[in-house]
Image (cartoon, rainbow, N blue to C red):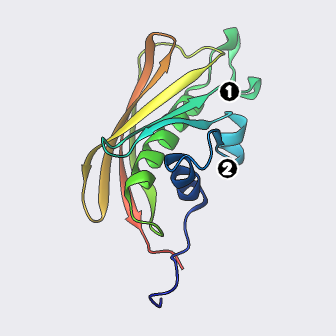
Amino acid sequence: MSADQTPAMNEDQILIRDFQSKRIAHAPIGSSRLADALKGHISAIDPDNNWIELSYEPDTFFFQAEQIIQGGATATMLDFAMAFAALAVVPDGQSVTTVNLNIAYLRAAKAGKLSAVAEIERRGRSLIFTRAKLVQGDAVVATGTSTLSVIGPRN
């Protein structure tokens, strides 16, 4: 790549940069049909302190009996948040992929709004370690940790 070319960026990384720079105030995650169905969007970001908050309001497609959100959807919300935290700190043109995901379910996530706050625990050249919590109202419904591999630069 020549010096005058900008690396191709991950669509989610572009969204993060636009939100960080305040070019956009509302940042729905449109790169994935799954994120769209979860009604995911960026709520807040603090790149100096390496954390991001994503908000969700899952569709009824994700409900089990009693309007409890299915565990895989809960894990997905945490995974998105941790990946976005990592995408926020890697250089433009690099991307990340989850190589390990651990979830602890603390209580049932019910229909309604949820927020996932993710932060970077440690950042290396090739691996990023993150943790997150999924909150509904005042209750933490699940926590997660993740290891992500840094990929790139993209062509």
For the C terminus, give its image quadrant.
Answer: bottom right
Secondary element type, mark 1: loop
Q: Residue furthest right?
A: 60
Quickly name the residue at label 1. 58
Q: Residue at x 62, y 39 (%)?
A: 25
Q: Position of residue 138 (x, y in %)?
A: 45, 9
Identify the element where label 2 is drawn.
loop
Amino acid at the residue labelled 2: Ser
| Residue drawn at the location 40% of the way across and 65% of the way down | 91
From what the image shows, is residue 83 above or below residue 126? Answer: above
Res 37 quadrant in image: top right
On the rendered structure, is 63 left or right of 104? right
How dense is the environment of label 2, judged by Cα within 10 Å: few (below 14), some, or many (20 and up)? few
Percent x, y for residue 66? Answer: 68, 8
Q: Residue furthest front?
A: 22
Q: Which of marks 1 and 2 precedes in the sequence?
A: 2
Residue 141 vertical placement versus 127 (above, below)? above
On screen, residue 147 versus residue 81, left or right, reads left
Q: Residue at x 63, y 15 (%)?
A: 68
Query: How far across and how far down the image is residue 61, in percent?
Result: 75, 28
Residue bearing the label numbered 2:
32
Q: Which amino acid type corresponds to the residue marked 1 in the rendered image? A: Pro
Q: Residue furthest bottom?
A: 2
Q: Position of residue 51 (x, y in %)?
A: 37, 39
Give the number of the disc on residue 86: none
